[in-house]
């Protein structure tokens, strides 16, 4: 049996278009690259143009197709314009990865109305309204994929993570609710909950080697995440390989939550 052809077909993203928010850095960039390597055209979006351009260059060097749209995703009013701009590159997206996120790491006593609203807007509100804007085209095609970014804090509390944890708990439920609403139209809605991966967001943790080691020791595998650990799950959830999986939050945490 031609096993290679089977795998290639099942996991291929050839002909698909993806929008990856937060695609200028860290997890978003790694997921954008994985999706491009599987054959999709990718549009990355975040605020910093120079970092988005780097992602475009990296993907282009790999032989993939990539473009960027710079936008501040904390403002819901920007979403229709973003969707319009994104669609002019390669057509309307079939795959949405909501990887833009913030964590202001304030103590419960110090959270302000402004930082609470910003956290909830970027981490929870925008993922929903972006998906809602892309839904009509996905429904028309009878196929789509939405991948949200949850967190260990979707399930448990860490210090100075109250607003972030509330937003990521929301992402966990949002993922189920999106699946309930949209999966009957062929749209898979799932979330990845990463353990500890070295990015801008977690620099304060990784700069503290004792803390980083403690987190690594808490996993079953015995190390923290590396961005390449997200490639397989990204292509799996973005492709037809995951056709009958929806509403799930998958922990890519080296067994952190299993221990
Ligand atoms: N790293 C981890 O261990 C870990 C663990 C669990 C969950 N996550 C989640 O994974 C996702 C990616 O995080 P990361 O670790 O890769 O951190 P990161 O490198 O800091 O990525 C966050 C991204 O969000 C974008 N962003 C922030 N504010 C924005 C805004 N107002 N408008 C548009 N884009 C904005 C940033 O780009 P600009 O600043 O250029 O806008 C950046 O590209 C987040 O949802 C995070 O919560 C990460």
Image (tube, rainbow, N blue to C red):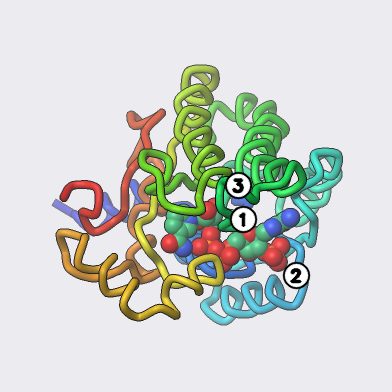
**Callout in the foreground (3, 1):** 3
Question: Residue 48 sits in which quadrant?
Answer: bottom right
Relative image position of residue 207 (x, y in whole percent): 45, 80
Asked if the residue under mark 1 is in contact with the one under mark 2, i.e. CB atoms within 8 Å, the reply is: no
Label 3 Cα neighbours within 10 Å, binned few <14 / some 14-19 / many ≥20: few
- Residue plotted at (65% across, 29% down): 135
32 vs 125, left or right, is left
Element carrying mark 3: helix
**First of labels 3, 1 by sequence position:** 1
Tell me the element at label 1: loop
Decide if residue 46 is on the left or right side of residue 102: right
Q: Quadrant of ligand 1?
A: bottom right
Q: Quadrant of residue 123?
A: top right
Q: Would the CB of label 2 be found within 8 Å of ligand 1?
A: yes
Upstream in the sequence, badge 2 or badge 3? 2
The 10 Å Cα crowd at callout 1, few under 14, some 14 to 19, many 20 or more, is: some
Mark drawn on residue 109: 3
| Lower position in the chain sequence, tag 2 or tag 1 | 2
Tell me, yes or no, if residue 205 can be seen here: yes
Q: Residue at x 50, y 74 (%)?
A: 203
Residue that appears at 64% across and 68% down:
24
Residue under numbered circle 1: 102
Q: Is residue 180 above or below residue 149?
A: above
Q: Quadrant of residue 226?
A: bottom left
CA gap between label 3 and label 1 equals: 19 Å
What residue would you read off at disc 2? Answer: 48
In this view, the residue in front, 144 or 72, is 72
In front here: 48 or 222?
Answer: 222
Whole-number angstrom distance, CA of label 2 to CA of label 3: 31 Å
**Beta carbon of the mark 1 residue lies under 8 A of ligand 1:** yes
């Amino acid at each position: 049996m031609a096993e290679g052809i089977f795998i290639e077909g099942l996991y291929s993203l050839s002909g698909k278009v993806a929008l990856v928010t937060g695609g200028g850095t860290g997890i978003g960039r790694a997921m954008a690259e994985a999706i491009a390597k599987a054959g999709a055209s990718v549009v990355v979006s975040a605020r910093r143009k120079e970092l988005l351009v780097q992602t475009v260059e990296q993907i282009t060097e790999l032989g993939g197709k990539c473009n960027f749209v710079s936008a501040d995703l904390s403002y819901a009013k920007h979403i229709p314009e973003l969707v319009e701009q994104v669609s002019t590159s390669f057509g309307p997206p079939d795959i949405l990865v909501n990887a833009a996120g913030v964590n202001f790491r304030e103590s419960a006593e110090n959270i302000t109305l402004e930082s609470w609203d910003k956290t909830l807007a970027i981490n929870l509100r925008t993922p929903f309204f972006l998906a809602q804007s892309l839904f009509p085209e996905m429904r028309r095609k009878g196929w789509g994929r939405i991948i949200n970014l949850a967190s260990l804090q979707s399930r448990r509390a860490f210090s100075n993570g109250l607003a972030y944890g509330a937003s990521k708990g929301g992402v966990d439920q949002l993922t189920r609710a999106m699946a309930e609403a949209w999966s009957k139209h062929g749209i898979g809605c799932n979330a990845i909950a990463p353990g500890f991966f070295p990015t801008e967001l977690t620099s304060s943790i990784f700069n503290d080697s004792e803390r980083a080691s403690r987190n690594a020791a808490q996993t079953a595998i015995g190390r923290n995440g590396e961005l390449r650990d997200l490639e397989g799950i990204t292509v799996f959830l973005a492709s037809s390989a995951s056709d009958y999986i929806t509403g799930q939050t998958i922990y890519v945490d080296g067994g952190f939550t299993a221990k």
